[in-house]
Amino acid sequence: MSKSKLLVLAVIAAAITAFFVFDLKQYVSLDYFQAQRAAIEAQVQAYPLRTALLFFGVYVAVTGLSLPGAAIMTLIAGALFGLLWGTVIVSFASTLGATLAFLASRFLLRDWVQQRFGDRLRPINEGIAREGAFYLFALRLVPAFPFFVINLVMGLTPIRTSTYYWVSQLGMFAGTLVYVYAGTQLGAFKISAGLLLAFALLGIFPLLAKKALDALKARKVYAGWTRPARFDRNLVVIGAGSAGLVSAYIAVAVKAKVTLVEKHKMGGDCLNTGCVPSKALIKSAKLLATMKHARDYGFKSATVDFDFADVMERVQRVVREIEPHDSIERYTSLGVECLTGEAKIVSPWAVEITTAAGKQTLTTRGIIIAAGARPFVPTIPGIEETGYLTSDTLWALRRLPQRLLVLGGGPIGCELTQCFARLGSQVTQVEMLPRLMVREDPEFSDLVQQKFRSEGVTVLVNHKAQRFAVENGEKVLYCEHNGNTVRIVFDTLLCAVGRVANTTGYGLEELGIPVTKSRTVEVNEFMQTKYPNILACGDVAGPYQFTHTAAHTAWYAAVNGLFGGYKKFRADFSVIPWATFTDPEVARVGLNETEAKEKNIPYEVTTYGIDDLDRAIADSAAHGLVKVLTVPGKDKILGATIAGEHAGDLITEFVSAMKHGIGLNKILGTIHIYPTLAEANKYVAGNWKRNHAPKGLLEWVEKFHAWRRG
């Protein structure tokens, strides 16, 4: 730290220390004012300008140093100087003091804080860059934090000082006026209608200010659009995947009039091309893999005669059996109007729907965008010429690919890699990053990678796809690896490098609804877009692209879409679990060690090896790991990862524990049925307990027992 910064810090520290050491707070209290009222009022009458300037200076010092007492001084200003001059004095003094605190924070801390905590401050920085003045005005008018916190935190952002000053002056004026008015009534020292009104204003001002701010923002957003006099629907939902179905279900359950529009199949990706078919294929492939290890179960041998086409037909049969759960018939019976066609938002309150019968336009109070996502196909030279499959299109296969190339080492790529390898394909998996499943800790990636290689999969990490080609009738991928070119021959390409939200074709561009850098629809914490009555949920909004999080965000979108004018609910992403259904399964909730290190979050690690678990040994599934991160010295769970049989089921205990604030001590004290895989959760809690045993107390207890033995 430079000498100038040290000097400023020393002056500030000395002033704050003096304030508390010499008990200067007593001079900015109502008790002191009441006791000295006559003398103070005499000074004001005798020397009005000098007293006002002195009061102004003290107020600037209190706010500039972020000391307690500004609110009391505002009331006193009303009592001493009246509504007009009290408001003028406090308005300018508070803004000047806030700006001094802002500048001190910027001078002393901004560079250091931005360098160390830039990722955590990113949402604030982005908000300031996007609409800094309005963002600060909202904080001033309806403070999400105390004003002194706003002063210090805003100093860490890139907002201009001049903007900060005038927005603060304007934003704090209404609140200042209310407080000063309350002070004018307190100056009378009697219960009056005015005094009661002042206290009422103090109580309801934040609510009134918030409503006024919302109205101002809405007026700005909806400028240029004509609101219908009446509405055909309470809600129109675009997309009938998991998010859209849940949104429509919730809305109709509370007796809203709802229209659900889907241009393809009800059930969306999860039912038709994602979760359901992939898990059906995983089950068939796992059964075949189990048969190949018959000796592990006491059998000399076991063989299975199968046809790949029959396996794929079973997958479609499973889809058909689940299909009625998401069907038009079911949702129509619930009261949802289901339309097959294309929807386009033509105004904030109108959706144009094109069906086989023609076009119609429905006016609606709310619109929910649940358009889902699609597989992302990178623009690698030659990929169109060689052709490719995605997780959407591979379900039409009826002949097993002999040489399958899987591009991508994420969850989808890993699940399908193992399936096709177990069914008999020669699978090569290519991943440009250093390991598979890079979002998980390295030991879990290694478990999956070792399993793949033991089952004949060629796993190529640190291989970046450069171009595809067809040479002498063979399909070829050229990759770069450690500066060298690697040539891979294949018959069929499965592209599984991720998914991208569907954000075009239904009116976002025309309405100016923005998308994020990750190409999802931009929403706030209430799942609202730029227009508060247009919401988005599921894969199209993120931040997670899972079926269960789609349903989770759909609840917030539906409730806020129907009742947001009266009460809104912030979407809670604090405890989000997920699983990759490879063998071994890998499931996680909360932080893992990799993320904790990246974010500089202190943690402790406790592990339990499933190879020691009785039920796992009995099932010939004695492999895997339970890993839990806790707050140092405490049993509070920060996150958990499980690899092993049924990890996706076992993680639920940790999900519930984190959601409801249950620590490892409570898990240890919970009876788990023997012998079950779920005992692994109890044993990892036991390991944590042993690591935190009170050694000093146990030494005394040992001596006590020795004394009892004589």
Image (tube, rainbow, N blue to C red):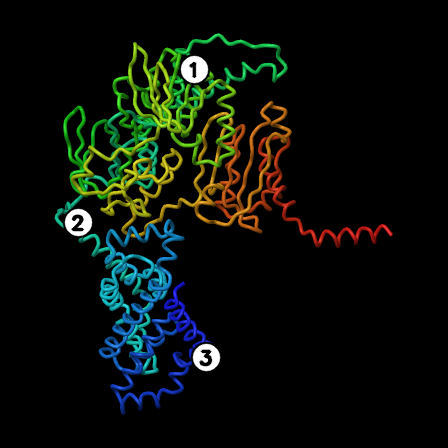
Label 3: state its secondary structure.
loop
Residue 407, above or below 196: above
Residue identified by numbered label 2: 222
| Distance CA(mark 1)–CA(mark 2) | 57 Å
Say the numbered circle drawn on residue 23: 3
Pick the residue in front: 56 or 87: 56
**Residue at position x 34%, y 72% in the image:** 63
Say the numbered circle drawn on residue 578: none
Residue identified by numbered label 1: 426
Cβ–Cβ below 8 Å for labels 3 and 2?
A: no
Looking at the picture, which amino acid does disc 3 mark?
Answer: Asp
Residue 370, above or below 399: below
Q: Is residue 345 left or right of residue 663?
A: left
Residue 267, above or below 204: above
Counting residues from the N terminus, which is met first, the one under dot 3 or under dot 1? 3
Q: Residue furthest right?
A: 710
Crowding at mark 1 (Cα within 10 Å: few <14, some 14-19, many 20+): some
x and y, in percent, of residue 180 in the image: 28, 75
